[in-house]
């Protein structure tokens, strides 16, 4: 990977350098904040088509990097504003990072009961009903425990939690079901109190090994679209990035 390293203060001379540097961070940021592959692919595609259409090269590395990061945050913001009705002003809490927090870090402040519920739901991929039977509690209590635990995960990563009481439990539970099943969740109007648990779900899903790697075919397709714009090939080795 040393040949992909770019030193700040130098310049990008072509779009392939930007693509090689930012494909993985952009996709992984999108996955953390959306929780699913389809929306992550849409956001990543939007970022690179925007960059290809507006970034003038050659450009200083720092300037170009800042442009890509801003485009990535805008893509995720559009996702939440357009699909779920989240106020744009709330989306200032969305931030970029090149590293995905580990599960241990995110679970650090959770009770043992909350930890167990999340492990069974996300890592073991058991249904809320199955978990309820195992824990000897009602399914509704299980769903509320999972939602509350995910809100604490969101708080752990620096997200503002407005209420300790779960909101829109049916819709949020269905959203979590889709995230765990690796489906694109159904859109609905999200109340501010319900949003943190959905953010927590995406971050937990992204922290599970392999989930936040882009699919081989997606990288190939995006490569072709950018190639059409620039008239050259971008990706030299798909194995570098894809799952």
Image: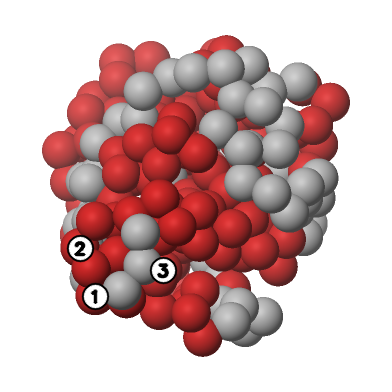
Find numbered disc 1 in the image and state the secondary structure of the residue it sits on.
helix
Label 2: how many Cα within 10 Å (few below 14, some 14–19, many 20+): some
Label 1: how many Cα within 10 Å (few below 14, some 14–19, many 20+): few
Which of pointers 2 and 3 lies earlier in the amino acid sequence?
Answer: 3
The answer to which of 35 and 241 lies nearer the viewer is 35
Label 3: how many Cα within 10 Å (few below 14, some 14–19, many 20+): many
Q: Is residue 128 left or right of residue 53?
A: left
The answer to which of 32 and 155 lies nearer the viewer is 155
Q: Is residue 221 above or below residue 115?
A: above
- Residue highlighted by disc 2: 130
- Residue highlighted by disc 1: 134
Residue 45 - label: none
Contact between labelled residues 1 and 2, with CB atoms less than 8 Å apart? yes
Which residue is at 60% across, 25% downward?
Answer: 190
Q: How many marks?
A: 3
Q: Is residue 32 above or below residue 48?
A: below
Where's residue 187, x and y in %? 43, 19
Which residue is at 70% across, 68% downward?
Answer: 156
Which residue is at 30% across, 39% downward?
Answer: 178
Give me the C-alpha separation between circle 1 and circle 3. 13 Å
Which of pointers 1 and 3 lies earlier in the amino acid sequence?
Answer: 3
Residue 118 - label: 3
């Amino acid at each position: 990977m040393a040949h992909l390293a770019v030193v700040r203060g130098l310049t990008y001379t072509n779009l392939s350098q930007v693509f090689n540097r930012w494909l993985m961070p952009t996709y992984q940021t999108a996955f953390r904040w959306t929780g699913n592959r389809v929306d992550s692919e849409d956001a990543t595609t939007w970022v690179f088509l925007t960059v290809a259409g507006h970034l003038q090269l050659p450009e200083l590395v720092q300037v170009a990097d800042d442009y890509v990061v801003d485009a990535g945050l805008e893509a995720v913001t559009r996702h939440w504003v357009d699909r779920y009705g989240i106020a744009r002003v709330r989306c200032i809490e969305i931030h970029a990072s090149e590293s995905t927090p580990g599960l241990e870090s995110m679970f650090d402040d959770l009770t043992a009961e909350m930890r167990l519920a999340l492990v069974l739901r996300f890592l073991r991929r058991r249904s809320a009903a199955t978990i309820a039977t195992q824990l000897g509690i009602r399914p509704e209590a299980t769903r509320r425990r999972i939602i509350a635990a995910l809100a604490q995960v969101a708080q752990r990563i620096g997200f503002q939690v407005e209420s300790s009481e779960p909101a829109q439990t049916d819709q949020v539970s269905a959203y979590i079901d889709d995230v765990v099943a690796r489906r694109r969740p159904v859109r609905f109007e999200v109340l501010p109190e319900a949003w943190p648990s959905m953010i927590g779900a995406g971050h937990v899903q992204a922290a599970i090994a392999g989930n936040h790697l882009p699919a081989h075919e997606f990288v190939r397709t995006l490569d072709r679209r950018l190639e059409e714009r620039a008239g050259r090939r971008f990706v030299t080795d798909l194995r570098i990035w894809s799952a």
